[in-house]
Image (tube, rainbow, N blue to C red):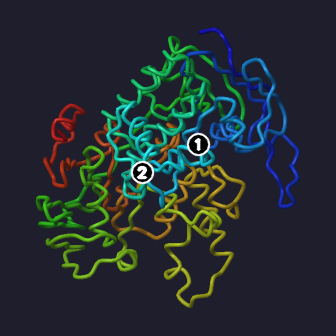
Amino acid sequence: MNNTILEMNHISKYIYDAYGKPIHGTDVKILNDVHFDVREQEVHILIGENGAGKSTLMKILGGIIPHDEGSIALFGKEVRFTNPRQSQTMGIGFIHQELDLCLNLDVAQNLFLGKETGKLFSDRRGMYEASREMLSRLGFDIDPATPVRLLSTAHQQMVEIVKAVSCDCKIIIMDEPTASLTQGEIDHLFEIIRNLKKQGVSTVYISHRFEELKEIGDRLTVLRDGGYVGTIDMSEFDHDKVVNMMVGRTLSHMYTCRHTPSAEEVLRVEGLKIAPETEPISIAVHRGEVVGIGGLVGAGRTELAKSIYGVRSSYGGKIYYQGKLVEKRNPQRWIDQGLMYLTEDRKLEGLVLPMSIEGNITLASLRRLFPNARLKSKVEREISTSMIKKLRIVCRGPKQRAATLSGGNQQKVVLGKWLSAKPKLLILDEPTRGVDVGAKAEIYEIIDGLAADGVAIMMISSELPELINMSDRIYVMRRGAVSAEMTDPDTFTQERVLAYTL
């Protein structure tokens, strides 16, 4: 366990100007004098707030970006990777937070992508047989001929795991690997990690879920604001101590709940079916109320939200909004009427990644802000600057491209977009996915503040503590239908919610 196989010392990464030259100065470093090491057969947890530099440090190790200062020693030999293939050849696998699969290819083609020179790739039948064996070896029941675009996010995550493990790696980097997995799938992943550990494989595990850390980790390293804070053994883990290392302060209250729901109904869904074979769904959301939607991955929660929003077909049923029957549903009509939907997948459906932060934040409000179709940069700047400050988005300014932000800060930009549009009803699909503990507390406070201002909120969440502590009522879904409505917050427990999901 004490045999160190990787050492990253004094690693720094500068921000580059428009001409590709580094801007020198400690205040403009993405990483500043960071240390990180990995021992043989260990799971090393890497945590920190969004924008702390975790993914950047791992991208350097994965050969995706170069470091500007410092050194990397792998198995006692100094290395410098200039591309991901070099890193992979040296025994490093990378499972990214944002899935890195080709959606137009099937599972087998994705697993063998980059290995086209081998005879197996030209042997189509052999490729699919090998893929089936690779999937089966890790206990994943996925047809290798299935196009990846047809897989759920959780199953795509499984394909990423198999792809990384299949490269005979000695170190596997897992960046938020459980974000889209059910509890059963998480347990399975942990068993895979333990088995890899027995086979001599080390894992660098990035996660914001504290409940996972003690279960799977051996050591834990904290980064803050691009700098190294410290490393501790998991036997020394203390929740408050680690939070203080991450955010520089202790969070006295994680969940905020000062709002009071009213009796005024904002949304009523009657007899809506999300598929021909599912049972009809009836739910309601009131003004100033946070209604939680619970259930396992695949239970139909996101499908329900998208059916309400008019971006997928539904089968029968009626929807009433502010007391009136809604005949035609589409996103633009809903936005004009004050119903907003923060989607689960921020990259594909929530953001225009090449666009600036200010462009994304004002995107849903253009018709209201500029009725004459003439953009005013000053107005855009004022609104985006205010939202950056309100949501504490870590960035270099409103002109920074959304694609260059950390995952958690991208999530805040999506939230800022909908807050700028002045919602009356806000559907939140996994609002804190990939968000650190400090940012979660901030988002919970914002949700509570919106409800206190009279906004109706429908919140889909896979995190049971979040669902239980933030909701006034909870609908639990199973197999595309509502299996239970829980109305008394004093009786909300993880055990009760889980019982209704099975």
Q: What element carries label 2?
A: loop
Specify whether 169 is left or right of 341: right
Q: Between disc 1 and disc 2, whose residue precedes?
A: 1
Q: Distance between the residues labelled 1 and 2?
A: 14 Å
Q: Decide if residue 317 is in sight here.
A: yes
* Residue at left offset 20%, top offset 49%: 477
Q: Kindly indicate the quadrant of the structure image that contains residue 134.
A: top left
Check the picture and name the quadrant holding the N terminus. top right
Label 2 sits on residue: 431
Task: Estimate the x, y position of residue 143 in percent, counting from the top left.
Answer: 34, 47
Badge 1 crowding class, 10 Å Cα cut-off, few under 14, some 14 to 19, many 20 or more, is: many
Q: Residue 197 carries which label?
A: none
* Residue at left offset 44%, top offset 20%: 195
Which residue is more in the foreground, 304 or 79? 79
Amino acid type indicated by mark 1: Asn
* Residue at left offset 25%, top offset 54%: 300
Task: Estimate the x, y position of residue 54 in percent, counting from the top left.
Answer: 63, 36
Amino acid type indicated by mark 2: Pro
Q: Does residue 87 lie above or below 386 as drawn?
A: above
Q: For the view shown, which residue lies furthest in the bottom direction? A: 372
Q: Is mark 1 on a helix, strand or loop?
A: loop
Badge 2 crowding class, 10 Å Cα cut-off, few under 14, some 14 to 19, many 20 or more, is: many
Specify whether 310 is left or right of 192: left
Q: Decide if residue 490 is in sight here.
A: no
Specify whether 14 is left or right of 322: right
Label 1 sits on residue: 50
Task: Estimate the x, y position of residue 303 in percent, counting from the top left.
Answer: 28, 60
